[in-house]
Image (spheres, helix red, strand yellow):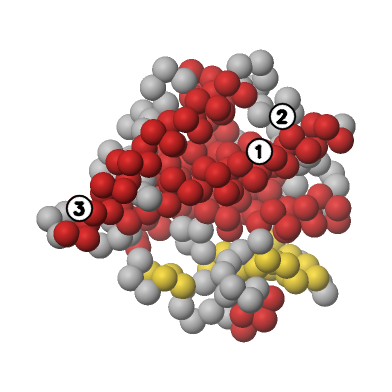
Amino acid sequence: MITLYSGPVSWFSRKVEIALHEKGLPFQQILVPFSQTKGYYDRPVEVVRINPKRQVPVMIDGAVGLCDSTVIIEYLEDAYPTPSLLPRSPADRARCRSLDVFADEVMLEPVRSFMHRTEPHDRASPRWLELERGALAALPRIAEHFDRLDDELKRTEHLCGEFSVADIACFMATFWANRLGGPGFGKRQNLRRWYRMLTARASFAKASAEILAQDTALSAPVKNAFEDC
């Protein structure tokens, strides 16, 4: 059986979990201990051995040990091709991979500016006020990324025509922005439709519910989270 070392509030671990569920692959989930003050701690030996960065996700499938969510999902596509999480044509597959990178690298950058909001905090402290200034400065960039996704979804139900890893990756980025009190969807009705459609899928609903439960247990949930989605 596949073993996945995951994190309770790990964007990229949950991305892999959704992919595994969508492919119907049974797996053992091992949550690496985490707190908002210490980060990940008591890392299992396998996580340290397989990932030089000592981060999750780390997946083991028999003799294969992998890290990085994109690499793991690419492996799953090769090893377990049905159902596929990539379109058929080379051009569409390349576009799908580009959207995966867009979510994981481009959208992640401004969303990082909001991640302090789930930490224990004193809203009057100089540190908190400085971090909030950074978050407010990042709002327009997240809004621009939401505009792009809304435009991508004008003509299709899913980002690449059919359900794909692009939907998984961009959903996680969008979910994280909403979770942290980002700019909301506003008049972006294509984005709103797509987001609600995905949250109704069993794999997305499971991951979302588990993250929110861990937020309650480990974090300081953001009061205005998910207000406009």
Of labels 3 and 2, earlier in sequence is 3
**Residue 166 spot, x, y in % from top left:** 67, 38
Query: Which residue is at the far left?
Result: 124
> In front: 219, or 53?
53
In the picture, the quarter occupied by the N terminus is bottom right
The residue shown at (66%, 57%) is 69
Residue under pointer 1:
99
In the picture, the quarter occupied by the C terminus is top left
**Residue 202 spot, x, y in % from top left:** 59, 40
Mark 2 and mark 1 in contact? Answer it, CB < 8 Å. yes
- Where disc 1 sits, the SS reads helix
Q: Residues within 10 Å of mark 3 (few under 14, many from 20)?
A: few
Residue under pointer 2:
160
Of labels 3 and 1, earlier in sequence is 1
- Left/right placement of residue 61 relative to residue 123 reads right
Residue under pointer 3:
129
Occupied quadrant, residue 96:
top right
Q: Amino acid at mark 3?
A: Leu
- Left/right placement of residue 41 relative to residue 44 reads left
CA distance separating discs 3 and 1: 33 Å
CA distance separating discs 2 and 1: 9 Å
- Left/right placement of residue 27 relative to residue 104 reads right
